[in-house]
Amino acid sequence: MGLPLPDLLFMTWRSLTNQWLRSGLTAFGVFMGVGAVSATLNIQTITREQIDLKLAARDRPFVTPHLWAREGPEPEIDETVQKSLQDSIAEIRTISSISRVFSVNNAQYEAQEAELSARSVSLNYLDTTGRRVLQGRFFDQADAEQYRPVVLIDEKLSESLFQGQSPLSKAIYASGNRFVVIGVIESKSNSDWETNGELWMTDTFASVLSGGYRWDQLQISAHSLTQVGTLSESIETFLLERYPQAEVYMESNAEDLLEDLEIQQIASAALTGVGVIALVIGGVGIANITVAAVLERTKEIGIRRAIGASKLEVMGQFILEAVILSLLGGLAAVITVHGLTRAATTVVIQAPYRFSPRNAALSMGAAVAVGVGASVIPALRATRVDIVKALRSD
Protein backbone atom coordinates (compact mmCIF):
# COMPACT_ATOMS: atom_id res chain seq x y z
CA MET A 1 0.00 0.00 0.00
CA GLY A 2 1.08 3.53 -0.60
CA LEU A 3 2.51 5.80 2.06
CA PRO A 4 0.64 8.97 3.04
CA LEU A 5 2.40 12.09 1.75
CA PRO A 6 3.62 13.28 5.22
CA ASP A 7 5.17 9.86 5.86
CA LEU A 8 6.73 9.82 2.40
CA LEU A 9 8.29 13.24 2.96
CA PHE A 10 9.56 12.22 6.40
CA MET A 11 11.11 9.04 5.03
CA THR A 12 12.70 10.95 2.17
CA TRP A 13 14.15 13.59 4.49
CA ARG A 14 15.52 10.93 6.85
CA SER A 15 17.19 9.12 3.96
CA LEU A 16 18.90 12.33 2.89
CA THR A 17 20.05 13.35 6.35
CA ASN A 18 21.44 9.90 7.10
CA GLN A 19 23.94 10.58 4.33
CA TRP A 20 24.29 14.29 5.00
CA LEU A 21 27.79 14.71 3.58
CA ARG A 22 26.94 13.02 0.29
CA SER A 23 23.65 14.90 0.11
CA GLY A 24 25.38 18.19 0.87
CA LEU A 25 27.99 17.72 -1.84
CA THR A 26 25.30 16.80 -4.34
CA ALA A 27 23.24 19.87 -3.43
CA PHE A 28 26.42 21.97 -3.75
CA GLY A 29 26.88 20.72 -7.31
CA VAL A 30 23.34 21.86 -8.11
CA PHE A 31 24.08 25.13 -6.28
CA MET A 32 27.03 25.86 -8.59
CA GLY A 33 25.07 25.12 -11.74
CA VAL A 34 21.96 27.06 -10.76
CA GLY A 35 24.14 29.90 -9.48
CA ALA A 36 25.76 30.22 -12.89
CA VAL A 37 22.36 30.16 -14.58
CA SER A 38 20.95 32.73 -12.16
CA ALA A 39 23.98 35.00 -12.58
CA THR A 40 23.66 34.78 -16.36
CA LEU A 41 19.99 35.75 -16.24
CA ASN A 42 20.73 38.64 -13.85
CA ILE A 43 23.52 39.96 -16.07
CA GLN A 44 21.24 39.78 -19.09
CA THR A 45 18.50 41.66 -17.21
CA ILE A 46 20.86 44.35 -15.89
CA THR A 47 22.47 44.90 -19.30
CA ARG A 48 19.08 45.02 -20.98
CA GLU A 49 17.81 47.58 -18.48
CA GLN A 50 20.95 49.69 -18.92
CA ILE A 51 20.43 49.63 -22.68
CA ASP A 52 16.73 50.48 -22.23
CA LEU A 53 17.65 53.45 -20.03
CA LYS A 54 20.08 54.72 -22.67
CA LEU A 55 17.45 54.21 -25.35
CA ALA A 56 14.88 56.15 -23.33
CA ALA A 57 17.31 59.07 -23.09
CA ARG A 58 17.76 59.39 -26.85
CA ASP A 59 15.80 59.13 -30.07
CA ARG A 60 14.67 55.78 -31.39
CA PRO A 61 17.51 53.83 -33.06
CA PHE A 62 18.10 55.20 -36.56
CA VAL A 63 20.77 55.20 -39.24
CA THR A 64 21.86 58.03 -41.52
CA PRO A 65 23.39 57.32 -44.94
CA HIS A 66 25.95 59.67 -46.50
CA LEU A 67 26.86 59.63 -50.19
CA TRP A 68 29.98 61.01 -51.86
CA ALA A 69 30.43 60.91 -55.62
CA ARG A 70 33.83 59.81 -56.84
CA GLU A 71 33.16 61.91 -59.93
CA GLY A 72 30.32 64.01 -61.26
CA PRO A 73 27.44 65.54 -59.27
CA GLU A 74 26.63 64.40 -55.76
CA PRO A 75 23.81 61.80 -55.76
CA GLU A 76 20.63 62.74 -53.94
CA ILE A 77 18.34 60.48 -51.97
CA ASP A 78 15.12 62.15 -53.04
CA GLU A 79 11.54 61.16 -52.21
CA THR A 80 11.44 58.59 -55.04
CA VAL A 81 14.56 56.87 -53.75
CA GLN A 82 13.24 57.02 -50.20
CA LYS A 83 10.04 55.28 -51.26
CA SER A 84 12.04 52.60 -53.05
CA LEU A 85 14.11 52.13 -49.92
CA GLN A 86 11.06 51.72 -47.73
CA ASP A 87 9.41 49.32 -50.17
CA SER A 88 12.55 47.19 -50.50
CA ILE A 89 13.78 46.94 -46.89
CA ALA A 90 11.44 45.45 -44.31
CA GLU A 91 13.52 46.67 -41.34
CA ILE A 92 12.71 50.32 -42.14
CA ARG A 93 10.12 51.76 -39.79
CA THR A 94 10.01 55.38 -41.00
CA ILE A 95 12.19 57.85 -42.88
CA SER A 96 12.37 61.50 -41.93
CA SER A 97 14.77 64.34 -42.72
CA ILE A 98 16.60 66.78 -40.49
CA SER A 99 18.94 69.65 -41.28
CA ARG A 100 21.12 71.87 -39.12
CA VAL A 101 20.23 75.58 -39.36
CA PHE A 102 23.65 77.18 -38.83
CA SER A 103 22.38 80.77 -39.00
CA VAL A 104 20.42 80.34 -35.75
CA ASN A 105 22.47 79.62 -32.62
CA ASN A 106 20.96 81.68 -29.80
CA ALA A 107 17.56 82.84 -28.60
CA GLN A 108 16.19 85.61 -26.42
CA TYR A 109 12.95 86.09 -24.53
CA GLU A 110 12.70 89.37 -22.63
CA ALA A 111 15.85 89.48 -20.47
CA GLN A 112 16.70 85.79 -20.83
CA GLU A 113 19.19 84.52 -23.40
CA ALA A 114 20.35 81.01 -24.23
CA GLU A 115 22.57 79.25 -26.75
CA LEU A 116 20.92 76.55 -28.79
CA SER A 117 21.13 74.19 -31.72
CA ALA A 118 18.54 74.88 -34.42
CA ARG A 119 17.30 72.26 -36.84
CA SER A 120 14.66 71.96 -39.49
CA VAL A 121 12.66 68.75 -39.59
CA SER A 122 10.12 67.01 -41.78
CA LEU A 123 6.55 66.56 -40.60
CA ASN A 124 7.08 62.90 -39.65
CA TYR A 125 9.99 63.68 -37.33
CA LEU A 126 8.11 62.48 -34.25
CA ASP A 127 7.28 59.14 -35.89
CA THR A 128 10.95 58.47 -36.54
CA THR A 129 12.45 59.68 -33.28
CA GLY A 130 9.66 58.79 -30.86
CA ARG A 131 9.88 62.12 -29.08
CA ARG A 132 6.82 63.34 -27.20
CA VAL A 133 5.28 66.78 -27.38
CA LEU A 134 4.91 67.84 -23.74
CA GLN A 135 3.02 71.07 -24.36
CA GLY A 136 1.24 72.51 -27.36
CA ARG A 137 1.44 70.77 -30.73
CA PHE A 138 3.80 69.70 -33.49
CA PHE A 139 4.00 71.25 -36.96
CA ASP A 140 1.15 70.59 -39.38
CA GLN A 141 0.91 70.78 -43.16
CA ALA A 142 -0.30 74.38 -43.07
CA ASP A 143 2.78 75.47 -41.10
CA ALA A 144 5.01 74.08 -43.83
CA GLU A 145 3.00 75.23 -46.84
CA GLN A 146 2.42 78.77 -45.53
CA TYR A 147 5.99 79.26 -44.31
CA ARG A 148 4.84 80.15 -40.81
CA PRO A 149 7.57 81.43 -38.45
CA VAL A 150 6.68 78.95 -35.74
CA VAL A 151 9.05 76.78 -33.71
CA LEU A 152 9.15 74.06 -31.12
CA ILE A 153 11.67 74.09 -28.30
CA ASP A 154 12.87 71.38 -25.95
CA GLU A 155 12.61 71.29 -22.15
CA LYS A 156 16.13 72.64 -21.62
CA LEU A 157 15.58 75.71 -23.78
CA SER A 158 12.11 76.27 -22.32
CA GLU A 159 13.52 76.34 -18.79
CA SER A 160 16.41 78.63 -19.78
CA LEU A 161 14.21 81.20 -21.52
CA PHE A 162 10.93 81.04 -19.64
CA GLN A 163 12.00 80.04 -16.12
CA GLY A 164 9.05 77.73 -15.51
CA GLN A 165 6.43 79.83 -17.33
CA SER A 166 4.46 78.42 -20.24
CA PRO A 167 6.20 79.28 -23.53
CA LEU A 168 3.16 78.59 -25.72
CA SER A 169 2.22 81.42 -28.11
CA LYS A 170 5.15 83.49 -26.82
CA ALA A 171 7.45 85.23 -29.29
CA ILE A 172 11.18 84.66 -29.07
CA TYR A 173 14.01 86.18 -31.07
CA ALA A 174 16.54 83.70 -32.43
CA SER A 175 19.60 85.25 -34.08
CA GLY A 176 17.49 88.27 -35.11
CA ASN A 177 14.47 86.26 -36.33
CA ARG A 178 11.10 86.43 -34.59
CA PHE A 179 9.41 83.09 -33.95
CA VAL A 180 6.27 82.02 -32.12
CA VAL A 181 6.57 78.96 -29.87
CA ILE A 182 3.82 76.42 -30.57
CA GLY A 183 5.09 73.47 -28.57
CA VAL A 184 7.62 71.97 -26.17
CA ILE A 185 9.29 68.62 -26.90
CA GLU A 186 11.06 66.41 -24.39
CA SER A 187 14.83 66.80 -24.29
CA LYS A 188 16.83 63.86 -25.52
CA SER A 189 20.41 63.30 -26.50
CA ASN A 190 21.90 61.27 -29.28
CA SER A 191 25.41 59.91 -28.98
CA ASP A 192 27.02 63.01 -30.53
CA TRP A 193 24.28 65.61 -30.07
CA GLU A 194 24.91 67.20 -26.69
CA THR A 195 23.34 70.67 -26.64
CA ASN A 196 22.27 73.37 -24.19
CA GLY A 197 18.86 73.44 -25.84
CA GLU A 198 17.21 72.67 -29.16
CA LEU A 199 14.88 74.55 -31.46
CA TRP A 200 12.99 73.09 -34.42
CA MET A 201 11.39 74.79 -37.41
CA THR A 202 9.76 73.53 -40.60
CA ASP A 203 12.08 72.60 -43.45
CA THR A 204 10.32 75.08 -45.77
CA PHE A 205 10.89 78.05 -43.47
CA ALA A 206 14.49 76.99 -42.84
CA SER A 207 15.07 76.88 -46.59
CA VAL A 208 13.91 80.50 -46.92
CA LEU A 209 15.95 81.54 -43.89
CA SER A 210 19.13 80.04 -45.33
CA GLY A 211 18.60 81.33 -48.87
CA GLY A 212 17.63 77.97 -50.30
CA TYR A 213 20.66 76.13 -48.95
CA ARG A 214 19.85 72.96 -47.02
CA TRP A 215 22.04 70.20 -45.70
CA ASP A 216 19.47 67.49 -45.16
CA GLN A 217 20.23 64.23 -43.45
CA LEU A 218 17.93 61.26 -43.43
CA GLN A 219 16.93 59.55 -40.22
CA ILE A 220 15.92 56.00 -41.10
CA SER A 221 14.53 54.31 -38.03
CA ALA A 222 14.43 50.59 -37.34
CA HIS A 223 11.66 48.66 -35.65
CA SER A 224 14.03 47.62 -32.86
CA LEU A 225 17.61 48.03 -31.69
CA THR A 226 18.59 44.53 -32.81
CA GLN A 227 17.61 45.35 -36.41
CA VAL A 228 19.91 48.37 -36.72
CA GLY A 229 22.91 46.36 -37.97
CA THR A 230 20.89 44.53 -40.61
CA LEU A 231 19.13 47.76 -41.58
CA SER A 232 22.42 49.59 -42.07
CA GLU A 233 23.86 46.81 -44.24
CA SER A 234 20.69 46.60 -46.36
CA ILE A 235 20.61 50.36 -46.98
CA GLU A 236 24.31 50.41 -47.89
CA THR A 237 23.83 47.56 -50.36
CA PHE A 238 20.77 49.25 -51.89
CA LEU A 239 22.54 52.59 -52.37
CA LEU A 240 25.71 51.04 -53.80
CA GLU A 241 23.63 49.22 -56.39
CA ARG A 242 21.73 52.39 -57.26
CA TYR A 243 24.75 54.71 -57.23
CA PRO A 244 27.78 52.57 -58.24
CA GLN A 245 29.85 55.72 -58.79
CA ALA A 246 29.40 56.84 -55.16
CA GLU A 247 30.87 55.93 -51.79
CA VAL A 248 28.41 55.16 -49.02
CA TYR A 249 29.04 55.79 -45.35
CA MET A 250 26.55 54.80 -42.67
CA GLU A 251 26.29 56.25 -39.18
CA SER A 252 23.86 55.53 -36.36
CA ASN A 253 22.82 56.95 -33.03
CA ALA A 254 22.91 53.43 -31.56
CA GLU A 255 26.45 52.24 -32.33
CA ASP A 256 27.47 52.28 -28.66
CA LEU A 257 24.31 50.40 -27.70
CA LEU A 258 25.01 47.72 -30.30
CA GLU A 259 28.49 47.31 -28.83
CA ASP A 260 26.99 46.95 -25.35
CA LEU A 261 24.54 44.38 -26.69
CA GLU A 262 27.32 42.40 -28.37
CA ILE A 263 29.40 42.36 -25.18
CA GLN A 264 26.34 41.23 -23.21
CA GLN A 265 25.70 38.39 -25.65
CA ILE A 266 29.32 37.20 -25.46
CA ALA A 267 29.30 37.33 -21.64
CA SER A 268 25.96 35.55 -21.50
CA ALA A 269 27.17 32.81 -23.84
CA ALA A 270 30.28 32.25 -21.71
CA LEU A 271 28.32 32.16 -18.46
CA THR A 272 25.69 29.91 -20.02
CA GLY A 273 28.41 27.45 -20.98
CA VAL A 274 29.76 27.47 -17.43
CA GLY A 275 26.23 27.02 -16.09
CA VAL A 276 25.52 24.06 -18.35
CA ILE A 277 28.77 22.35 -17.33
CA ALA A 278 28.04 22.95 -13.66
CA LEU A 279 24.49 21.66 -14.05
CA VAL A 280 25.76 18.53 -15.78
CA ILE A 281 28.20 17.95 -12.92
CA GLY A 282 25.38 18.44 -10.45
CA GLY A 283 23.24 16.02 -12.44
CA VAL A 284 26.00 13.41 -12.36
CA GLY A 285 26.17 13.84 -8.59
CA ILE A 286 22.42 13.33 -8.27
CA ALA A 287 22.57 10.23 -10.48
CA ASN A 288 25.39 8.80 -8.37
CA ILE A 289 23.63 9.39 -5.07
CA THR A 290 20.42 7.86 -6.45
CA VAL A 291 22.29 4.75 -7.68
CA ALA A 292 24.00 4.42 -4.31
CA ALA A 293 20.70 4.83 -2.49
CA VAL A 294 19.08 2.11 -4.58
CA LEU A 295 21.95 -0.31 -3.86
CA GLU A 296 22.02 0.48 -0.15
CA ARG A 297 18.26 0.23 0.32
CA THR A 298 17.55 -2.91 -1.67
CA LYS A 299 15.98 -4.66 1.33
CA GLU A 300 13.83 -1.59 2.10
CA ILE A 301 12.62 -1.58 -1.51
CA GLY A 302 11.76 -5.28 -1.25
CA ILE A 303 9.79 -4.78 1.98
CA ARG A 304 7.84 -1.86 0.52
CA ARG A 305 7.04 -3.82 -2.62
CA ALA A 306 6.02 -6.86 -0.54
CA ILE A 307 3.48 -4.87 1.49
CA GLY A 308 1.85 -3.40 -1.58
CA ALA A 309 3.85 -0.38 -2.75
CA SER A 310 3.66 0.02 -6.51
CA LYS A 311 6.62 0.45 -8.82
CA LEU A 312 5.56 4.03 -9.44
CA GLU A 313 5.57 4.80 -5.70
CA VAL A 314 9.04 3.33 -5.25
CA MET A 315 10.31 5.24 -8.26
CA GLY A 316 8.64 8.42 -7.04
CA GLN A 317 10.43 8.28 -3.68
CA PHE A 318 13.89 8.29 -5.25
CA ILE A 319 12.94 11.04 -7.70
CA LEU A 320 11.53 13.03 -4.78
CA GLU A 321 14.85 12.76 -2.95
CA ALA A 322 16.66 14.11 -6.01
CA VAL A 323 14.15 16.92 -6.44
CA ILE A 324 14.51 17.97 -2.79
CA LEU A 325 18.29 18.16 -3.12
CA SER A 326 17.89 20.14 -6.34
CA LEU A 327 15.41 22.54 -4.76
CA LEU A 328 17.65 23.11 -1.73
CA GLY A 329 20.71 23.72 -3.89
CA GLY A 330 18.74 25.86 -6.35
CA LEU A 331 17.08 27.97 -3.65
CA ALA A 332 20.42 28.60 -1.95
CA ALA A 333 21.92 29.59 -5.30
CA VAL A 334 19.11 32.03 -6.15
CA ILE A 335 19.31 33.69 -2.71
CA THR A 336 23.12 33.90 -2.82
CA VAL A 337 23.28 35.27 -6.36
CA HIS A 338 20.55 37.80 -5.54
CA GLY A 339 22.49 39.03 -2.53
CA LEU A 340 25.79 39.23 -4.40
CA THR A 341 24.18 41.01 -7.35
CA ARG A 342 22.46 43.49 -5.05
CA ALA A 343 25.77 44.24 -3.32
CA ALA A 344 27.68 44.49 -6.62
CA THR A 345 25.19 46.91 -8.18
CA THR A 346 25.07 49.20 -5.16
CA VAL A 347 28.60 49.08 -3.72
CA VAL A 348 30.94 48.13 -6.58
CA ILE A 349 29.15 49.65 -9.58
CA GLN A 350 25.95 51.62 -9.94
CA ALA A 351 23.59 49.62 -12.13
CA PRO A 352 19.83 49.09 -12.27
CA TYR A 353 18.87 45.85 -10.57
CA ARG A 354 15.77 44.45 -8.95
CA PHE A 355 14.80 40.93 -8.02
CA SER A 356 13.15 39.17 -10.96
CA PRO A 357 10.61 36.45 -10.12
CA ARG A 358 10.89 35.30 -13.74
CA ASN A 359 14.65 34.76 -13.47
CA ALA A 360 14.21 32.98 -10.13
CA ALA A 361 11.54 30.72 -11.61
CA LEU A 362 13.75 29.86 -14.60
CA SER A 363 16.67 29.07 -12.29
CA MET A 364 14.57 26.86 -10.05
CA GLY A 365 13.07 25.21 -13.11
CA ALA A 366 16.60 24.33 -14.27
CA ALA A 367 17.31 22.86 -10.84
CA VAL A 368 14.19 20.69 -10.85
CA ALA A 369 14.83 19.60 -14.45
CA VAL A 370 18.33 18.46 -13.53
CA GLY A 371 17.06 16.65 -10.44
CA VAL A 372 14.32 14.80 -12.27
CA GLY A 373 16.37 14.10 -15.39
CA ALA A 374 19.37 12.74 -13.49
CA SER A 375 17.36 10.50 -11.17
CA VAL A 376 14.90 8.90 -13.58
CA ILE A 377 17.15 6.09 -14.84
CA PRO A 378 18.48 5.09 -11.37
CA ALA A 379 14.93 5.28 -10.00
CA LEU A 380 13.75 2.97 -12.79
CA ARG A 381 16.40 0.54 -11.63
CA ALA A 382 14.78 0.47 -8.21
CA THR A 383 11.50 -0.72 -9.74
CA ARG A 384 13.26 -3.75 -11.27
CA VAL A 385 14.53 -5.07 -7.94
CA ASP A 386 13.49 -8.71 -7.44
CA ILE A 387 11.30 -8.78 -4.30
CA VAL A 388 12.40 -12.25 -3.14
CA LYS A 389 16.12 -11.51 -3.57
CA ALA A 390 15.68 -8.15 -1.90
CA LEU A 391 14.05 -9.68 1.18
CA ARG A 392 16.86 -12.27 1.48
CA SER A 393 19.60 -9.63 1.18
CA ASP A 394 21.48 -8.36 4.23
Image (spheres, helix red, strand yellow):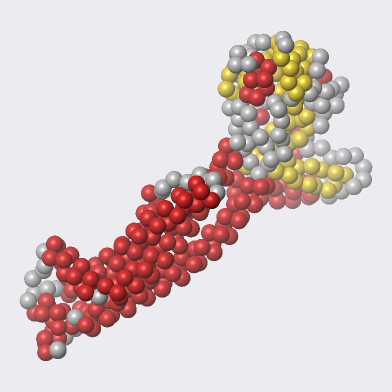
Q: Nearer the viewer, residue 227 or 268?
A: 268
Q: Going 21% across and 74% down the picture, which residue do you hit? A: 18
Q: Going 66% across and 44% down the picture, which residue do you hit? A: 254
Residue 15: percent from the left, percent from the top?
20, 73
Which quadrant would the C terminus be assigned to in this image? Answer: bottom left
Look at the picture and state if 341 lies above or below 391: above
Q: Going 14% across and 89% down the picture, which residue do you hit? A: 393
Look at the picture and state if 367 lies above or below 48: below
Q: Going 29% across and 67% down the picture, which residue do you hit? A: 325
Look at the picture and state if 135 lies above or below 292: above
Residue 239: percent from the left, percent from the top?
77, 46
The answer to whether residue 37 is seen in the rendering is yes
Q: Residue furthest right?
A: 72
Q: Is residue 233 left or right of residue 317?
A: right
Q: Nearer the viewer, residue 109 or 104?
A: 109
User: Which quadrant of the structure image shows residue 330?
Assistant: bottom left
Q: Nearer the viewer, residue 250 or 140?
A: 250
Task: Give the tally of numbered discs.
Answer: 0
Look at the picture and state if 150 lies above or below 319: above
Residue 24: percent from the left, percent from the top?
31, 70
Residue 360: percent from the left, percent from the top?
38, 54
Q: Is residue 227 left or right of residue 291?
A: right
Which quadrant would the N terminus be assigned to in this image? Answer: bottom left
The answer to whether residue 126 is seen in the rendering is no
User: Which quadrant of the structure image shows residue 38?
Assistant: bottom left
User: Which quadrant of the structure image shows residue 210?
Assistant: top right
